[in-house]
Image: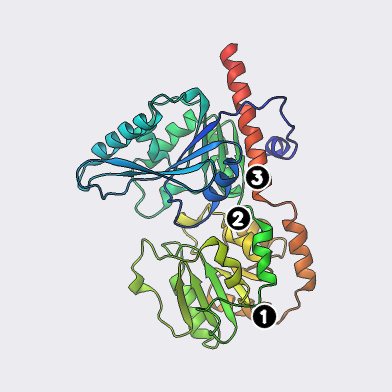
Amino acid sequence: MEKKERAINGLQESANNQLPANLLCLSHLRWDFVFQRPQHLLTRLAKKLNVYFFEEPIFDATEQAYLTISSRGKNLSVIVPHIQPGLSPEEVNELQKDMLDRFLVNKNLNDFAFWYYTPMALEFTSHLKPSVTIYDCMDELSAFKFAPPQLKDLEKKLMDRADVMFTGGQSLYEAKKHQHENIYPFPSSIEQKHFAKGRTISEQPADQKDIAGPKLGFYGVIDERFDIELIRGIAEARPEWQIVLLGPVVKIDPETLPKNSNIHYLGSKTYQELPSYLAGWDVALIPFMLNESTRFISPTKTPEYLAAGKPVVSTAIRDVVKPYGVNNLVSIATDARDFVKAIELELTSPKEEWLKEVDAFLAQNSWDLTVKNMLQLIENSITEKVSSSAA
């Protein structure tokens, strides 16, 4: 671990920039779904590189498959394959391979970096040899609901190909560090100025401002990781508290969600809207179940909640417990009864000294610094690769 810390914390500027001019990202997430780690990293990488974000297919083509390419800002394009429904997985992969090959025709692969979020993309990219291959392992995808059975084998192949590998948290790094010789942990970071607005905004959004009483809030994807019964238990124990939940409901039946009158489902919100909702909350929640799908997650919302000045109560997610819980920045609870006790304490305790500790902890935590360090490690990997080839 000391070697990794020295490599990340003691990075030196390289004598010349050896980065390729283009980056192709293969992602299991959609760009316009929830603004999270890939979006934070790639919008910053687009300041240096031409970034192409290749999404999973949409099955809406009527006659033949096609690609749509749309801009999300300077040097950043989103590429979406549109494929006919009803095809076999092999046919879908063959179509994606063909469309990607046509997209790359007359382009020099030596001037491309491939950045993988999903090993599944190897099924249609394994024949391509870019200048450098990066695997940013942000989650243990094989533990998620509906994970393809071949995902684990494909991840092994991807790690064999990757010149450098990053993980989305410390616990995930600990689980993977023996599987790759050039792997580094980069836990969730923060755009602090953006979320600090939550400390000063006075006007709440229209769908939240009329919710009266202490507000407990959560934003993020409401899926199989979300502890429905925990939320139900808190709502029933304290009907005077109002629980505000922001985000899409996916991979679970919405009918299973608790319908208590003090639980408010306000739907998806944009990244830009989040500070205005946070401003009206008294306590922020991280109500994830403890299971295989949450074993290695590093919730981006943890530092974001803190930057907005909101006390946080979380289940014992490993990457929340350490470093946030052990530094007394976040309260850790187990069940509804514990959550209620922790929330009551947070609602009544003074926050001045705690906020000073939060700000000191977050001072060196930024997506800009993360990207800077990642780029240096990628450049180092390219230099080493070139030197090995020459030798």
Between 159 and 315, the one nearer to me in the picture = 159
The number of callouts visible is 3
Tags 1 and 3 touching, CB below 8 Å: no
Residue mark closest to the camera, 1 vs 2: 1
Mark 1: few/some/many CA within 10 Å (<14, 14-19, 20+): few
**How far apart are the two marked residues, 1 and 3, measured between alpha carbons?**
33 Å
Q: Amino acid at mark 2?
A: Asp
Tags 1 and 2 touching, CB below 8 Å: no
Residue mark closest to the camera, 3 vs 2: 3
Which callout, 1 or 2, points at the residue further toward the start of the chain? 2
**Residue tagged 2:** 319
Specify how the rendered protein is coloured. rainbow
**How far apart are the two marked residues, 1 and 2, measured between alpha carbons?**
24 Å
Kindly indicate the quadrant of the structure image that contains residue 82: top left
Residue 115 spot, x, y in % from top left: 50, 37
The answer to whether residue 48 is left or right of residue 108 is: right
Residue mark closest to the camera, 1 vs 3: 3
On residue 347, the disc is: 1
Look at the image and tell me whether residue 173 can be seen: yes
Q: Is residue 225 above or below residue 206?
A: above
The answer to whether residue 52 is left or right of residue 317 is: left
Quarter of the rendering occupied by the N terminus:
top right
**Residue tagged 3:** 370
Q: Is residue 17 above or below residue 238?
A: above
Residue 384 spot, x, y in % from top left: 62, 22
Q: Amino acid at mark 1?
A: Leu
Q: Is residue 230 above or below residue 68?
A: below
Which callout, 1 or 3, points at the residue further toward the start of the chain? 1
Which callout, 3 or 2, points at the residue further toward the start of the chain? 2
